[in-house]
Image: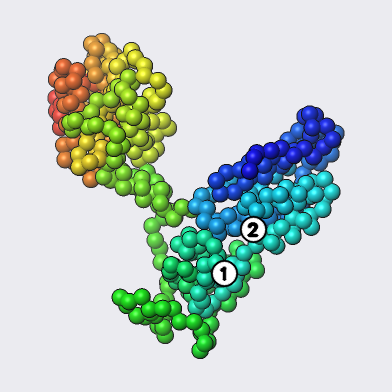
Amino acid sequence: MTERTIYLDPDPHDWRCRRIRVHASRWYATISLDRDGYVDATSSRGDTPELPAAYTEAVDRVREASTDRIWFDGYPGSFSWGNGPRWVNLFAPFPHVEATVEALRLAELDRDYSSLHALADRLVLPIDDWLAPGERELVRGVDFDSQPGAFLRFLRGKAKGRGVRLNGRATAGSVWVRPTLSLVEKQRREMFPEQYPGWEDCWTGYVESDDAPSRPWVGSRGQDLSYGATPVHFRAVETPGSGDCPCGMRLQEPLDDGKEHIAHHAAWAFGIRPPRNLDWWSDLAVVTTQSPIAWRKLAYQVARMPQKENHYDFRSWSHLDEPEVTTDNMRAYLLKANGYVIGYLAAHDTSEHRSWDLIDGSRYGDEDDALRPRIILIWVADTYRRKGVGATLVQALADDFGCQVADVSWSSPVSDAGRRLARRVSPEGIWVS
């Protein structure tokens, strides 16, 4: 399918002309109605550019049905679109692209929304039937055409939105499902009916008929060990709030089922897995602004860990353009252990310092203009903290510069963890800048 533009007004070169753009991607086509110039012209005449409610309702029906259909076909990603009168975006499976374009054209020019509603009726899936109570087998080639595993994931997402537990299993040519409603979801919907308009409980009290299909036994354990069981009871108690995890992510359940938090927390705890194409000849790598881009990208990735954990505005490493020479000799020390980058120190050289005896509340001492290596930030993976990794990084910085650890400068203000490390490696005091 080629990308194309369909003009809706007589003069296609006028800036006020409305146009429909069709853009094909791997799984579907995006149909975008561009009303930007048309809205500006309408507003300049004092008319309202807002879309009629019936128009918006019809577009929303098609968008909901088409995105469900695309997910049903196996698409693993997400969709995004904006609201407002300037752009109308729809996503269409390839067999329905022409019908979508024509229905959108009729809605825009003639305010005829019947084609949009007819298109939504053709695209809508029998999700309510699939999630109705009772054991059933959905057969590939009859009820669905995608991979059984992908279809089961689609059904699980729809079941979760309805508060239903699916109890499903994919086989080579079908998907078995037995939707049930948990007591907590039932109570939630009955307590807050305004949040679930039109919801009806058809699962509680459902009794399986004698001629219901029997799910094949796959070994290992009985088919239904919960048959006739007593429901679990719930009580309201005080629980910890949805604050921040020590890794820097939010504790409340995100929209992606916690996948991003799990990946970030694992990297925060164990370190960052370096790319396989990097030849790591020793435990410690010194990355400069002139290093190959793969090394500088790795330093940038590791720098995200302390940024997220401490809620900094910027990462301590940002050199991702072409190699360059910096006047302050900016560099990053990456310490690797057990296949992961577990330690990170960002540093540069500067000549403005003051002495400090590390006593809380004491003032800084006299100024010093000697060129010294300055620690910008130190980060250690959580599992390896309090094991001497930070001291190893500071010693490496001093050795690399050719000075004593006591001559290293620390960026101010020094964090509590930084003070503990500084007292351990330089108990007589440090330089700060």
* Amino acid type assigned to the residue bearing label 2 in the image: Ala
Residue at the top extreme? 369
Horizontal arrangement in the rendering, residue 216 relative to residue 154 (left or right): left
Q: Establish if 42 lies above or below 67.
A: above
- 422 above or below 127? above
Question: Which of pointers 1 and 2 indicates the residue nearer the eye?
Answer: 1
> Counting other residues with Cα less than 10 Å from the Cα at mark 2, is it few (<14), some (14-19), or many (20 or more)?
many
Which residue sits at x=40%, y=63%?
238
Mark 1–mark 2 Cα distance, whole angstroms, equals 19 Å
Dot placed on the residue nearer the N-terminal end, 1 or 2: 2
Q: Secondary structure at mark 2?
A: helix
What residue is shown at x 26% (from left), y 10% (from top)?
A: 369
Amino acid under disc 1: Val
Q: Secondary structure at mark 1?
A: loop
Q: Nearer the viewer, residue 382 or 178?
A: 178
* Residue bearing mark 1: 142
The label shown at residue 65 is 2
Observer able to see residue 199: yes
Q: Which disc, if any, is residue 249?
A: none
How many discs appear?
2
Label 1: how many Cα within 10 Å (few below 14, some 14–19, many 20+):
few
